[in-house]
Amino acid sequence: MADPSGESTDRSDGPNAERSLDPDDWEGVRRIFHEAVDLAIDHLRGQRDGPVWRATPDAVKRQLAAPAPTAAQSLDALVAEFRRDILPYGTGNVHPRFFGWVHGAGNLAGALGEMLAAVMNCNVGGRDHVAVYVERQVVDWCKAMFAFPATSSGLLTSGTSMGTVIALAVARNEKAGADVQRNGAGAAPRPITAYASREVHGANEKAFDLLGLGAAALRRVAVDAHFRIRIDELARQIAADRAQGLAPAIVIASAGTVNTGAIDDLEALASLCRAEGLWLHVDAAFGGLAVLVPEFRARLAAIAQADSVAFDFHKWLQVPYDAGCVLVRDEAAHRRSFSARGEYLAEGTALAGGDPWFCEYGPELSRGFRALKVWFTVKAYGMDRLAAVIAQNCRQARHLGAAIAAVPELELMAPVDLNIVCFRFCAPDLSAAAQDRLATEIVATLQTAGIAAPSTTRIAGRTAIRVCLTNHRTRTEDLDLLVRETVRIGHALAAPRS
Amino acid sequence: MADPSGESTDRSDGPNAERSLDPDDWEGVRRIFHEAVDLAIDHLRGQRDGPVWRATPDAVKRQLAAPAPTAAQSLDALVAEFRRDILPYGTGNVHPRFFGWVHGAGNLAGALGEMLAAVMNCNVGGRDHVAVYVERQVVDWCKAMFAFPATSSGLLTSGTSMGTVIALAVARNEKAGADVQRNGAGAAPRPITAYASREVHGANEKAFDLLGLGAAALRRVAVDAHFRIRIDELARQIAADRAQGLAPAIVIASAGTVNTGAIDDLEALASLCRAEGLWLHVDAAFGGLAVLVPEFRARLAAIAQADSVAFDFHKWLQVPYDAGCVLVRDEAAHRRSFSARGEYLAEGTALAGGDPWFCEYGPELSRGFRALKVWFTVKAYGMDRLAAVIAQNCRQARHLGAAIAAVPELELMAPVDLNIVCFRFCAPDLSAAAQDRLATEIVATLQTAGIAAPSTTRIAGRTAIRVCLTNHRTRTEDLDLLVRETVRIGHALAAPRS
């Protein structure tokens, strides 16, 4: 776009001849689509045989710094470029030995849904068309999953981060004691405060910043040995804030912390919020989905008592990126917070019908048809099989925890309560700082060699190798390989400095 | 998910056998993908022969109210269900005679990119992988398009609504005169005010609400006969607010209003903002893309002087939904507003490298690879051909304006300056209210009959039939048909009540 001439390239019939972007050669485009499908399916089928990650070559980075082309490129050449320069250098999370951060591994049925959504090209911001009904169905499935009332509302989002912004906006507007939507957060008679464990995901603090409440309004409460929020500390902090004339308003519960997979005592938090008149929001980004697995159901059942919950489909439900959801118990409050339709969006009939519109439940006026990839995923596998993946990952985490405990050089750094395993390679001769560096280097070496992709985090001030199992392709043998390679690399890296 | 049993359906090798979501029968899935490709391409190829819109049948709505299945469904059956119940009932914006709201029509190269992105399943929140470089390239193309400096920053978003939230958050944080990120919007020593024309898109007011500044902080300034903000009124309002002890901080310019396509005097606004020390944000949702067309370039060139700009790819660049972008001149300010990486996201090497991460420029931690469909669209057609579609739509709008002016029963309700035509059917015997209802009914009838899909809006207190041309498939003959059918339906509907 450096030098867009803006002149029509149409030469078919004079300078003002009309021309769409549809192909002249439909069969040629059809053939290329078919080739791309084969490329995509072969890519996924061969994942286990390749490295989990490989660095993007400098030559490719240079290629991807070129200005926007003014002229068209053949679709054949474009797919060839994609195959050579892009496809091999992805994030790695489709590989069986990707264990980093919290990434889902995707699935083919979901990708099929995404392709069909792209061709339909629906705008699900509003109006009356089938994509609205598909999204409503997916939202209803989610309400049922968390035993939210049928009268509650929901919205598909890009992920839990945006779901959190939306849920906390509603909480802010309901709890501020003033019309902060019209007059600003400063109009609240007393400053709002909110509470979450020290382990809560950073997206919550970012949401408080974005919403004009200030990140400092979110108090971080101490955790117990299982990294769950301490209810006694929480109650003490709420009382202290009230005594200072502040307005405690919101508690954010973690249903699966990102560091260790800890699940707060949701039942206790729900009771406390009822007693104190606070809004209970549950950050269920990945862990909440374990409600589908019998052994975790009791610990997650109290999500049903929350005022709002946000979670992702693209993590433990394996839907291709990006896709998350927010549910709000009080539909009217949810709609009040976001309903603002302009004159060109007046209620009407025919295509202009379909009230309420999804744009009345979030900040986005235009919205893609991301519900379709969720719909394809859920229907293609069924909830039982998706739940089985979650149960499988938790079994694998316990296996890995036991394997680590059995190796003298390795040390677990947190209880394995869900699907996350934090550990380190112990080199007793090294200082704490050197041990921390060693953990980072082991992880980088595993990644660079393409062997496996765990990530790192900090546990009680020390660097941990962190394995998060939200990957349906992982097998126990992959974890055994990780243990062996970690020990081998740990010895190799530690030797020169001991 | 009503009754998720959560038990593994794996029967292959005992209750704890490991099983991925990958197909056992890869060739069967490959065949179904190929069938779906044919379905999709035939669907687009046949658009002109079908109705622009048809209501979703009640039987389909009932079908789409079913609970989540616990068991798997064959992918064959699922694609058949999609073909029967979903594909025919889309928004309609892929049809040549969709003229409603501001909807792009999509394109096959973009859909191909979206399919490949879904299979790669990258998370572009951060880390070091190729999707990051593709998004950086697309952002760089956008900087070049608007002549933003190479040192500026940008982020792909779901659309202009989110781009606006991000841009105005940065503006808020830079102009507040206090650490509002930490301490809340109320910490500003004087309340921030902002300014935009009465015709500005509602997403801007929603953003002020969301950001805790309050929707009332956005002052709506009067417009001239071309629906452009009155610079004299704006200056007067800024002075009045300053005199009252408020802190004027932000001006939002419209580069293509949603009602009539009006482009504010950007050069004058840039001068005023420089003189007054205000942040200039440009809402360029669709109209900004006309910078690619020579005849509009001069009127849009001053976007280059803005502090931020937000716009969509899914409108006038024809990328499949959803895809937008925000650019911010001051990269450091942009990053300060959103950079908050948790301990599990520590900077590192290998896969954990790639600084800066895109999640440091917006609220989303997980982000899909929406850059790929933009990349495919731009490279497959080239900027010249994409610009030619924009020029073509503007020529068509002028043609339609002239055609309406030539028909006695029809009346233009606003100047045709860009790609939007607002008009009405005049039935002199009817009251103003009855005329307004008639316009709504004509539009509903056109939609219900599947003939065409304009929408309505309000112009100076009266209901207009509104035609927005952001559709590469539209031909002049489609607009001539619209005029004929509007007159025919107008007479038929007006007759009984005259």
Image (cartoon, coloured by chain):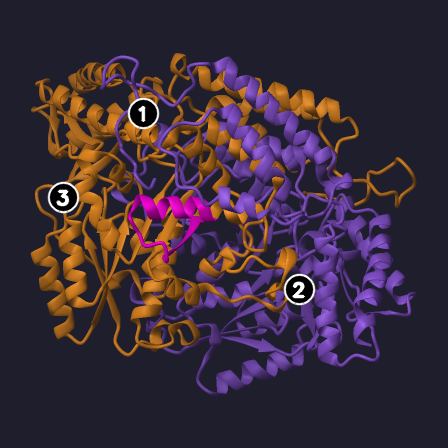
Chain colours: A orange, B purple
Q: Residue at x 35, y 69 (%)?
A: A173
CA–CA distance between discs 2 and 3? Answer: 51 Å
The type of residue carrying mark 3 is Phe
Residue A209 picture quarter? bottom left
Would you name the residue on which mark 1 appears? A453
Q: Are marks 3 and 1 in contact (CB under 8 Å)?
A: no
Q: Which residue is mark 2?
A: B257
- In magenta, the rendered stretch is A136-156
Circle 2 packing at 10 Å, graded few (<14), some (14-19), many (20+), is many
Q: Nearer the viewer, mark 3 or mark 1?
A: 3
Q: Amino acid at mark 2?
A: Thr
Residue drawn at 27 percent across, 25 percent down: B8
Residue annotated with mark 3: A227
Quadrant (top left/top right/bottom left/bottom right) for the C terminus of chain A: top left
User: Quick one: B49 or A112, which is closer to the camera?
Assistant: B49
> On screen, A19 above or below A266?
above
Q: How many marks?
A: 3
Q: Which secondary structure lies at badge 1?
A: loop
Name the one closer to the observer, B272 or A121.
A121
Element at badge 2?
Answer: loop
Up-down relation of residue A397 to residue B422 (above or below) = above
Chain to which mark 1 belongs: A
